[in-house]
Amino acid sequence: MNDKLARQVKILQWYAVILTLVVLVLAIYVIKSGRKGTVDVLTAHRINIVEPDGSLKLVISNAAQQHPGAVEGKEMSPRRRSAGLIFFNDDGTECGGLGYEGNKNAASFELSTDQYRNDQIMQMQYDEDSIGGVRSRSYGVRMWDRRDDLNLKYLIGLTDSLAQVHDSIAVAKAYAALRAKRPTVERLYLGKTRDKEVGLFIRDAAGRTRIRIGVDSLGQVIWEKLDTSGSVQR
C-alpha cells in the first residue's frame, strides 16, 4: 500500500471515529432530554407504519406515492389513488382508509370501512364536479352488501384474466355474467343526492329502492314505500 492510499485510509478511519462519537453524543442528548426524537414539523411524501415484524399496517401518503392496495400481502397493480391514509389487516389486505382530492373541476372525500377480504361496505362520501359550467354534488353515508364467495381476491383475479383476453364480445359476456351474480349491492344511502333530494333511501337485497323518506328539491316531503317493480304503494 503506497503512502497516499495509507493516508486516505487513515483519514477515513478518523472520519468514522468522529462520526460515531457525534452520533453517540446526539443519542445520549435525546435520551436524557426525554424528547424521544420529537420534531415540531415533519415533511414527507409517504410514511409507512409497520409492526415489529415489518408487516405493513398503515400508509400515510401523497397522491404520487400512494400505495396501490394489497390482498393477502400481494400488492395490486399500480393505479391512480388520492392522497390520504390506507389501513391493512393482519393478513396484509387493505381494510379501509381515508382519501381526499379537489380542484376547480371536481372534488371528493371518502372515509371507508372494508369488509374482511373484500371492498368497502360502509363509506362517508362527498363528491362534486362541474359539467357544462353546472356544479353538481352529493354527500352522505352509503352501505353495501358484498358476497363472500366473490371476494376481492377473486374479482382481481378475474379482472386480470379478462385483461389477457382479446375477444371483446367474450369479455363483455363475462362481465355481464358477473353483474348478474350481484357481487355488490348498495343497501342504504343517507344524505343529499345529485337530484337535490335529502333523505334516507333503503334498498332490498336485489338493489331495488323500497323506502324513500326525505325532502325533494322543491321542499316537498317524501314518504314512500315501493314494491319490487318500483311502484309506490299507499
Image (cartoon, rainbow, N blue to C red):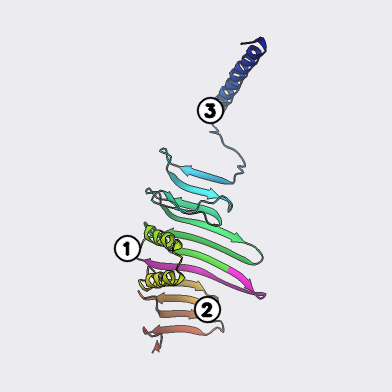
Q: Amino acid at mark 1?
A: Asp
- Give the mark nearest the N terminus, 1 or 3: 3
Q: Nearer the viewer, mark 1 or mark 3?
A: 1
Residue 138 shown left or right of residue 175 in the figure: right
Residues under numbered marks 2 and 3 in contact, where contact means CB atoms less than 8 Å apart = no
Secondary structure under the numbered disc 1 in the rendered image: loop
Kindly identify which residue carries mark 1: 149
Question: What's the magenta region?
Answer: 128-150
- Give the mark nearest the N terminus, 2 or 1: 1
Of residues 185 and 216, the one drawn nearer to the viewer in this rendering = 185
Residues under numbered marks 2 and 1 in contact, where contact means CB atoms less than 8 Å apart = no
Q: Amino acid at mark 2?
A: Glu
**x, y percentage for residue 230?**
41, 85
Residue at image x 40%, y 48%? Answer: 73
Kindly identify which residue carries mark 2: 197
Q: Amino acid at mark 3?
A: Ile
Residue at image x 42%, y 41%? Answer: 51
Of residues 34 and 218, the one drawn nearer to the viewer in this rendering = 218
Q: CA distance from mark 2 to mark 3?
A: 58 Å
Secondary structure under the numbered disc 3 in the rendered image: helix
Q: CA distance from mark 2 to mark 1?
A: 35 Å
Name the residue furthest left: 149
User: Residue 31 bears which disc, if any?
Assistant: 3
